[in-house]
Amino acid sequence: MKTFLLKQKKRKNGFTAIEIMTVIVLLGIIVSVTLLNFISSSKRKGYDSSLMENMRLVQTMLETYKIDWKSYPDNVSQLGNAATKKKYNKPLVNPFTRVSGTIESGNTVVDFVDPTSGTFLANPTVYEGKVGYQLIDISKYYLIGYGEKGIPIEKNGKAYLVTNG
């Protein structure tokens, strides 16, 4: 009985090595999970920012096209051909694949594909990091950025679109 009381008294003076090691391991797990989430979030935001930059560059090319031809192109190919002829076709870099190319290469800009269509759903990662161009009428267009897994990028909870009006 006396030894039991002595053990109880000794235990109250501090923590055992096992208790300290358990706390250190748990803190390590919490820190690593938090750090991974932070890195993943930062990486995704960087990709989205790069894609938004590509969208703005395509918008500049579209506006230049309109000045030259008095209307917007029907498709990406038409824009690419005219931009190459007039020497304003700038290379873009797909932030997800790191593949660089001009508009007509198909690596960075594509004609708009509805994210709910069968064509898109069959293989959405094909569109990852690309800018989609959709002509609405002769005076209006939309640019949409296909982000991670081909999902359209968002800003402030809404789809991020670039348009001329």
Image (cartoon, grey):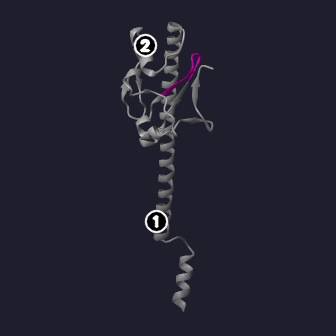
Q: Label 2 crowding class (10 Å Cα cut-off): few <14, some 14-19, many 20+? A: many
Q: Nearer the viewer, residue 71 or 97?
A: 71
142 in the magenta segment: no
Binning the other alpha carbons within 10 Å of mark 1 as few (below 14), some (14 to 19) or many (20 upward) gives few
Residue 148 position, x and y percent, is: 47, 39
Which label lies toward us, 2 or 1? 2
Residue numbers of the magenta segment? 132-141
> Residue placed at 38% from the left, 28% from the top?
107
Q: Is residue 40 visible?
A: yes
Q: Mark yes or no: residue 102 visible.
A: no
Q: Is residue 92 above or below residue 14?
A: above
Image spot of residue 17 (x, y percent): 46, 69
Give the mark nearest the N terminus, 2 or 1.
Answer: 1
User: What secondary structure predominates along the stretch shown in magenta?
Assistant: strand
Distance CA(mark 2)–CA(mark 1): 64 Å
Q: Position of residue 56 (x, y in %)?
A: 52, 22
Q: Which mark is residue 21?
A: 1
Position of 65 with respect to 164 (left or right) is: left
Task: Name the residue located 43 percent from the left edge and 17 percent from the top edge.
Answer: 78
Q: Residue at x 57, y 75 (%)?
A: 12
Tell me the tag on residue 44. Answer: none
Taking depth in this image into account, of 18 and 54 the one nearest to the observer is: 54
Residue 69 drawn at (x, y percent): 50, 8
Residue type highlighted by circle 2: Ala
Amino acid on which disc 1 is placed: Met
Label number found at residue 83: 2
Report helix, strand or loop for mark 2. Answer: helix
Question: Dividing the image into 4 quarters, which one contains the N terminus?
Answer: bottom right
Quadrant housing the C terminus = top right
- Whether residue 138 appears in magenta in the rendering, the answer is yes
Residue 95's image quarter?
top left
19 or 148, which is in the foreground? 148
